[in-house]
């Protein structure tokens, strides 16, 4: 099991007892725009997903970790590596803190820092990227804080409530390798 520990949070692999949390996250329409979700998920589908969450990143091409405050505290968010491409040593990054009151607590920042270190120094990735809606200033600030650079904008990329919205692409190159 993967566990990455920071000062105030830790990242861990998903567990079967995360069923209700992941189910709630996947069905929270307020974050569908960020997570690119379009339809609700059943508990059955989430349970199947959790049963396969043990797959190696090289097999699944993704890694989803729970963001937790301490060993007894349930997950407060999720952070992902997706579109893992070992040939070109890159992956996308996504992060969501579920409850509004848990945002702006520096937990997302600490989680992103832990994931960047893991991706660069354990997986030996050369680059990470993030796709962020141009109106999501909090996420743009978070990724910029860690050196991600805006490399472009995909115009009218996502359709949200009948309105096409732009999406920025941010990239972080690991120049340490």
Image (spheres, rainbow, N blue to C red):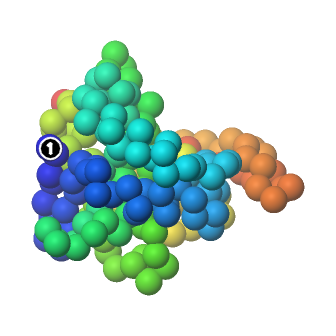
Looking at the image, can residue 1 be seen? yes
Q: Quadrant of the C terminus?
A: top left
Identity of the residue drawn at 26% across and 51% down = 15
Nearest the camera: 134 or 30?
30
- Say which element carries label 1: loop
How packed mark 1 is, by other alpha carbons closer than 10 Å (few <14, some 14-19, many 20 or more), is: few
Q: Quadrant of residue 77?
A: bottom left
- Horizontally, is 47 left or right of 74 in the view? right
Q: Position of residue 99 (x, y in %)?
A: 46, 75
Q: Position of residue 41 (x, y in %)?
A: 57, 49
Q: Residue furthest front?
A: 44
Looking at the image, can residue 132 be seen? no
Q: Residue furthest bottom?
A: 101
Identity of the residue drawn at 62% across and 57% down = 32
Q: Residue furthest right?
A: 162
Q: Quadrant of residue 88?
A: top left
Question: Which residue position is annotated with label 1?
Answer: 1
Nearest the camera: 150 or 16?
16
- Horizontally, is 164 left or right of 1 in the view? right
Nearest the camera: 120 or 14?
14
Identity of the residue drawn at 55% across and 50% down = 42
Q: Position of residue 127 (x, y in %)?
A: 35, 34
Identity of the residue drawn at 37% across and 28% down = 61
Q: How many marks?
A: 1
Position of residue 44 relative to residue 136, above or below, is above
Q: Position of residue 171 (x, y in %)?
A: 44, 42
Q: Quadrant of residue 111?
A: bottom left
């Amino acid at each position: 099991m993967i566990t990455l520990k920071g000062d105030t949070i830790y990242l861990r692999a998903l567990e079967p007892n995360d069923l209700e949390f992941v189910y709630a996250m996947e069905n929270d329409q307020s974050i569908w725009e960020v997570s690119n979700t379009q339809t609700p998920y059943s508990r059955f589908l989430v349970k199947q997903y959790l049963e396969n969450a043990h797959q190696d990143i090289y097999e699944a091409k993704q890694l989803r970790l729970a963001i937790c405050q301490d060993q007894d505290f349930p997950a407060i968010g999720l952070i992902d590596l997706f579109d893992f491409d070992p040939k070109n040593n890159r992956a996308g990054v996504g992060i969501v803190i579920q409850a509004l009151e848990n945002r702006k607590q520096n937990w997302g920042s600490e989680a992103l820092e832990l994931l960047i270190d893991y991706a660069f120094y354990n997986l030996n990735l050369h680059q990470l990227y993030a796709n962020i809606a141009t109106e999501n200033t909090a996420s743009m600030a978070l990724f910029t804080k860690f050196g991600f650079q805006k490399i472009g904008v995909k115009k009218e990329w996502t359709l949200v409530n009948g309105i096409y919205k732009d999406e920025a692409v941010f990239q972080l190159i690991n120049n340490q390798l």
